[in-house]
Image (tube, rainbow, N blue to C red):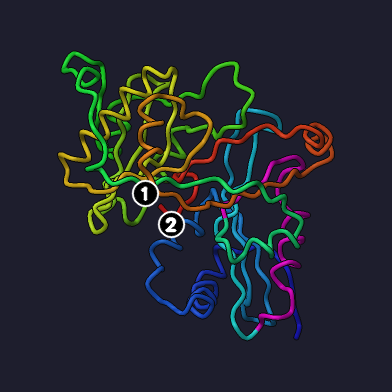
């Protein structure tokens, strides 16, 4: 083998990368999604080549965060083609990527499947205690009708109208949790440019720039997914969750689904989890850069990760 580790060249490598992807995952139906999530300016992909062939790849999406070092990279795709597995290329490529990011300081995050968590541990990632995805049947939930009133200042619209409505999404003030900054550029790329945006029907319901939920209604599974959320108060959270329960019933959704985090505190939330099943959702993190390591080595803040921070939804 004549292996070379380098950054993906978007001008020269697209065809070779797609060929390697199809070999690794044994499917050829992902071209539009790969074009969207890998072949874009937000993405940094590192590859292993053997002569003129790509044999492994590891991709990260660059994100802004609210605390030092103000940038993060979210791992979103990793593969090694079958004939090159068993040579620890995944670990070697991960370590190469860590040494060749385009910034000196950053935090790295990811949400891998359970079966690849051991690889991430070997590569130097810190494995967080698993979070939980809650899934609840809508018919088990009762609305608090006094919270759903015509006079409430809730707005709801498809995300393809996002720019027309000229709203901005803010993060809580004076917060000591690590959060992704949901700027217009990211929202438009993540949801409006997604190749499956129409069938997933990405929408937003909001009370203010600090209280909102971005969600999808996936009709084949009759499922409403909470993808991103922020609440200025438990009152706002109650209002928005009850609104979404009501909307789910109106739209024919049978399942309510979201990733748990400490932002959820309301009585409505407690009612939902009491009637939900749950599954583990693994989160990983890594500090990159001497200053970041020193700041967070003894006390790493909680980081808020939603389903929408993973490009699978």
Measured as percent of width and height from the top left, residue 297 is found at 81, 37
**Left or right: where 41 falls relative to 300:** left
**Left or right: where 253 falls relative to 27:** left
In this orientation, which residue lies closer to the viewer: 94 or 256?
A: 256
Element assignment for label 1: loop
**In magenta stretch: residue 120:** no
**In magenta stretch: residue 102:** yes
Mark 2 packing: few (<14 Cα in 10 Å), some, or many (20+)? some
Q: Mark 1 points at which residue?
A: 193
In this orientation, which residue lies closer to the viewer: 38 or 244?
A: 244
Measured as percent of width and height from the top left, residue 147 is found at 25, 19
Task: Give the magenta part as a residue range.
Answer: 84-111
Measured as percent of width and height from the top left, residue 54 is found at 61, 76
Q: Name the residue under label 2.
A: 36
In this orientation, which residue lies closer to the viewer: 293 or 38?
A: 293
The reply to whether callout 1 and callout 2 are in contact (CB within 8 Å) is yes
Q: Residue furthest top?
A: 151
Quadrant location of the N terminus in the rendered image: bottom right
**Left or right: where 69 falls relative to 154:** right
Measured as percent of width and height from the top left, residue 68 is found at 70, 30
| Upstream in sequence: badge 1 or badge 2 | 2
Q: Which residue lies at the image location 34% right of the left edge and 23% below the top edge?
A: 238
Q: How far apart are marks 1 and 2 (CA)?
A: 7 Å
């Amino acid at each position: 083998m004549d292996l070379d580790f380098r950054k993906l060249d978007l001008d020269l490598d697209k065809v070779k990368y797609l060929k390697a992807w199809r070999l690794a995952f044994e499917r050829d139906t992902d071209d539009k999604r790969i074009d969207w999530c890998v072949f874009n300016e937000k993405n940094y992909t590192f590859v292993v080549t053997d002569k003129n062939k790509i044999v492994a790849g590891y991709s990260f999406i660059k994100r802004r965060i609210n605390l030092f070092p103000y940038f993060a990279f979210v791992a979103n795709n990793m593969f090694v083609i079958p004939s090159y597995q068993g040579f620890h290329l995944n670990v070697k490529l991960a370590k190469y990527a860590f040494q060749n990011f385009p910034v000196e300081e950053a935090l790295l995050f990811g949400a891998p499947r359970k079966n690849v968590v051991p690889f991430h541990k070997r590569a130097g990632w810190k494995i967080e205690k698993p979070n939980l995805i809650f899934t609840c049947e809508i018919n088990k939930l009762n609305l608090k009708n006094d919270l759903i009133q015509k006079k409430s200042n809730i707005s709801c619209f498809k995300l393809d109208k996002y720019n027309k409505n000229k709203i901005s999404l803010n993060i809580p003030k004076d917060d000591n949790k690590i959060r992704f900054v949901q700027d217009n550029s990211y929202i438009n790329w993540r949801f409006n440019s997604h190749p499956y945006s129409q069938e997933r029907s990405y929408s937003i319901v909001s009370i203010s720039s600090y209280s909102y939920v971005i969600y999808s209604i996936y009709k084949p599974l009759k499922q409403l997914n909470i993808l991103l959320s922020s609440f200025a108060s438990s009152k706002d959270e109650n209002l928005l969750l009850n609104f979404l329960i009501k909307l789910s019933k109106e739209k024919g959704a049978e399942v309510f689904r979201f990733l748990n985090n400490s932002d959820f505190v309301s009585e409505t939330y407690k009612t939902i989890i009491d009637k939900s099943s749950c599954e583990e959702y693994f989160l990983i993190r890594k500090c990159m850069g001497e200053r970041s390591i020193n700041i967070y080595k003894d006390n790493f803040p909680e980081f808020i990760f939603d389903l929408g921070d993973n490009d699978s939804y």
